[in-house]
Amino acid sequence: MDRSASASIPTSTSSPPYSIPLPSGSGSWLYTTLAVLFTLLALEQSVYRYKKRHLPGAAWTIPVIGKFADSLKPTMEGYMRQWNAGDLSAVSVFNIFIVMASSNEYSRKILNSPTYAEPCLVHAAKQIIFPDNWVFLTGKEHVAYRKALNLLFTRKALSLYFGIQDKVTREHFRNWVSTDGKPRPIMMIARHLNMDTSLRVFCGDHIPAAATQEISDKYWDITRALELVNFPLALPGTKIWRAIRARKVAFKWLVEAAAKSKVHMANGGEPTCMLDGWLQTIQDPEWKGRKEFSDREMAMVIFSFLFASQDAMSSGLIYAFQHLADNPAVLAKVREEQDRVRGDPNNPMTLELFNDMPYLNAVVKESFRVKPPVLMVPYKTTRAFPISDDYTVPANSMVIPSFYNSLQDPEVYSNPQEFDPTRWLDPNGPAQSSPRNYLVFGSGPHRCIGVEYAIMNIALVIAHAVSMWDWEHARTHESDEIEIIATIFPKDGCHMKFTPRAT
Ligand code: HEM
């Protein structure tokens, strides 16, 4: 049988007998559409290959969606594959050209090149946390605003926060002890603790207790909407729609708290929280910086802090529990240090005492290193960025510095997978001598502003839990699996049982 006819390309003037009859003119329309589509797809591939040049990464991109499916359900293994492909590698998602940086040198370069690249929050962020929130500022405006906010994290301010953290943690811990003898996942109770602590630190009693619970419950909707990939429109029922509803509730309380704080301070009150301390400083005649912040503006700053507090800090806290429970010898040393320095666990923790606890400090630092809550942060290039001698990232691309490889570098951290706090105790050891590798909190102009606050909070919770309880981690087959939400968590939520300390 001669099949050549069926293989021939039909033309608009001669329809083969087996074709579906088309109204006159629609054949050419179809071929034109197909030709345009084909050209667009070919162009998409050419642009991708032109931008990618010699970088490792798929030679062809999946038409239109690129690696969308992978980014919907990111896995540690998937990221590792990409990072291991090279110090710089390319990928495309929905025609956004992305350069992933895995080495310390390139990751730091991206974070420290504000004239080429700036943070790129997910598309939904502006809808959820307001487009005029300070976190979207860049360049000189960002530097100036951030300078004004540094007063919120001075040593004096941190001392005030420590007292509040201490009190709230003790209140919450009443409900953490196992009453039925069974372990339970600490994922949500740790999140709630962090949210409550932060709301009290930031707003004190200017937010009623019931509202704290309401905000904490609703905030989970906000976290889920800020995942790296999400449906971008706020249609009813979508994650973004739910997050906007949650934000409205939370934001109303924060604006009200700012207004109440102003009244409290104007009446000569003592500072009880971050908002009060902020007002006290800027109202001081000696203060040379900006003196006016509207209620809404103060609420937006607190809102930006809340997001980081409950998400990254919860990841850090849960892994600190898991690491210590799985390493009883380390836990025993933390306990010994607590007993020695603080004595009675009922004694409050202070900033001065904390500075006398090098082992606890090392434990927190090491826990962050082994499981950094934030694996990477997306930046975008504002112009062509000559990142290396032989590669320039095109303008308007995404560049994503990774922190994981820097924190697992065997040259700096021997046996990098091992949880070994002692590596931080030798001031001349490789870990302490290589601060450039410690990218847990980023680097450069956008480096985390809450770093001391976060470290203090996790250390304090751990110190109390070690001093007051015996711990048991019910390991499951998912304890070592990593769930990537916006930050990372043990897939099983970390099942722990706490009982009053026996000895
Ligand atoms: C374990 C907890 C935390 C981790 C691991 C963490 C990590 C990070 C990282 C990686 C960045 C991006 C840095 C960069 O682009 O170079 C960042 C930025 C930021 N963090 Fe944190 N963070 C934590 C807790 C907090 C807390 C508690 C607050 C607030 C009190 C906070 C407030 C912020 C803010 C406002 C930014 C943006 C700074 C800017 O753009 O200037 N973070 N954080």
Image (cartoon, rainbow, N blue to C red):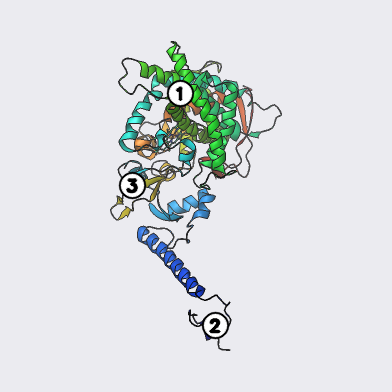
Q: Nearer the viewer, residue 142 or 439?
A: 142
| Crowd around label 3: few <14 · some 14–19 · many ≥20 (10 Å) | some
On the question of residue 334 being in view, the answer is no
Q: Nearer the viewer, residue 287 or 403?
A: 287
Name the residue beneath numbered marker 2: 16
- CA distance for labels 2 and 1: 85 Å
Q: Residue at x 33, y 33 (%)?
A: 143
Relative image position of residue 59 (x, y in whole percent): 42, 62
Element class at badge 2:
loop
- What type is the residue that disc 1 sits on? Met
Q: Residue at x 49, y 34 (%)?
A: 307
Relative image position of residue 494 (x, y in whole percent): 60, 37
- CA distance for labels 3 and 1: 44 Å
Q: Nearer the viewer, residue 17 or 208?
A: 17
Work out whether mark 3 precedes mark 1 in sequence or the reverse, and give the earlier one.
1
Q: Residue at x 41, y 62 (%)?
A: 44
Is the distance from the Cβ of mark 1 to the nearest ligand 1 atom less than 8 Å? no
- What type is the residue that disc 2 sits on? Pro
Residue occupying the far left of the picture: 389
In the rendering, which numbered label is found on residue 357? 1
Quadrant where the image shows the N terminus: bottom right
Q: Nearer the viewer, residue 225 or 77?
A: 225
- What type is the residue that disc 3 sits on? Thr
In the rendering, which numbered label is found on residue 492? none
Looking at the image, do the residues carrying marks 3 and 2 touch, with CB atoms under 8 Å apart? no
Element class at badge 1:
loop
